[in-house]
Image (cartoon, helix red, strand yellow):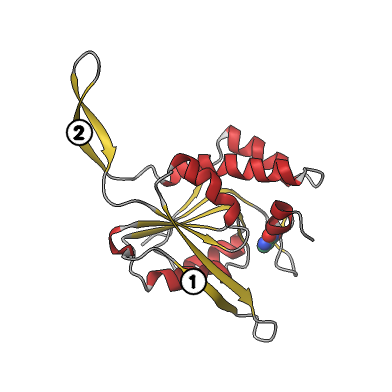
């Protein structure tokens, strides 16, 4: 299996991402831009959704139309910055189900520890899109996807805004079967686990914390 990384480098995405990266961009703009980019990422991430044919009637005639087949998609946000991706995704997929995974890094072991896990039941027939804006070290995304896989979903993709070679390597070493959809692959990770040049702490910028 060749691990897949889909970089959605559409001009609208790159323009909005550059606005988000600027250090003087306000919390309100950052939030709105993340939501807008999330819609564009969702558009690409759902490109392979299965369709079923439906015969419908327009005001003029009968025709063969299409509808998304299967059960509702499940969006799973990795807390807390993943919450910023939900709005945009739900604007495009208002009936999607939503789950949340909370992890913190143990200060001694530096390993992710789960403190919250609530996802819709019966994931077996559902496609899951895991949302985490920054795939940096990759450790929390690896842990979240490992946990989600225990529920045996029909498929999983990881949606992030930004990543770096280190994050992709770590994530795909653990989950080569999970495609990554991202707006950009930055240069590297610094010693503090931040993406360079990146955009800083996505959670702080989204919620106006420090
Ligand atoms: N998380 C963030 O919010 N930013 C980074 O650069 C890395 C991880």
In this rendering, the answer to whether 143 lies above or below 58 is below
In this rendering, the answer to whether 1 lies above or below 24 is below
Residue at mark 2 to residue at mark 1: CA–CA distance: 37 Å
Give the position of the N terminus as an image quadrant: bottom left
90 on left or right of 205: left
Q: Dot 1 corresponds to which residue? A: 117
206 on left or right of 154: right
Quarter-of-image position of residue 28 = top right
Residue 197 seen in render: no
Residue 54, disc: 2
Q: Which quadrant of the figure shows ligand 1?
A: bottom right
- Which x, y percent locates residue 131? 52, 56
Q: Is mark 1 within 8 Å of ligand 1?
A: no
Structural crowding at the residue carrying mark 2, measured as other residues with C-alpha within 10 Å and reported as few (<14), some (14–19) or many (≥20): few
User: What residue appears at the point 26 percent right and 50 percent down from the top-left corner?
Assistant: 70
- Which x, y percent locates residue 104? 62, 74
In this rendering, the answer to whether 136 lies above or below 30 is below
- Which x, y percent locates residue 45? 44, 47
Residue 5 seen in render: yes
Instruction: Check disc 2 and report its element: helix, strand or loop.
Output: strand
- Which x, y percent locates residue 11? 59, 33
58 on left or right of 189: left
User: What residue appears at the point 71 percent right and 40 percent down from the top-left corner?
Assistant: 29
Structural crowding at the residue carrying mark 1, measured as other residues with C-alpha within 10 Å and reported as few (<14), some (14–19) or many (≥20): some
The outermost residue toward the bottom is 108
């Amino acid at each position: 299996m060749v691990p897949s990384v889909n970089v959605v480098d559409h001009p609208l995405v790159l323009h909005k991402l550059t606005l988000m990266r600027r250090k003087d961009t306000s919390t309100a703009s950052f939030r709105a831009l993340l939501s807008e980019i999330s819609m564009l990422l969702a558009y690409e991430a759902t490109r392979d959704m299965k369709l079923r044919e439906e015969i419908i009637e327009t005001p003029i005639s009968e025709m063969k139309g299409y509808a998304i087949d299967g059960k509702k998609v499940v969006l799973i946000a990795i807390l807390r910055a993943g919450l910023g991706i939900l709005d945009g995704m739900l604007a495009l997929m208002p009936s999607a189900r939503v789950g949340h995974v909370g992890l913190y890094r143990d200060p001694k072991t530096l390993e992710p520890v789960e403190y919250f896990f609530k996802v819709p039941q019966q994931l077996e027939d559902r496609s899951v899109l895991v949302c985490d804006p920054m795939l940096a070290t990759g450790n929390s995304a690896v842990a979240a996807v490992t946990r989600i896989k225990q529920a045996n979903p029909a498929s999983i993709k990881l949606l992030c805004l930004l990543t770096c070679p280190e994050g992709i390597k770590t994530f795909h070493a653990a989950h080569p079967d999970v495609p990554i959809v991202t707006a950009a692959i930055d240069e590297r990770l610094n010693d503090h686990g931040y993406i360079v040049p990146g955009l800083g702490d996505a959670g702080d910028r989204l919620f106006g914390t420090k």
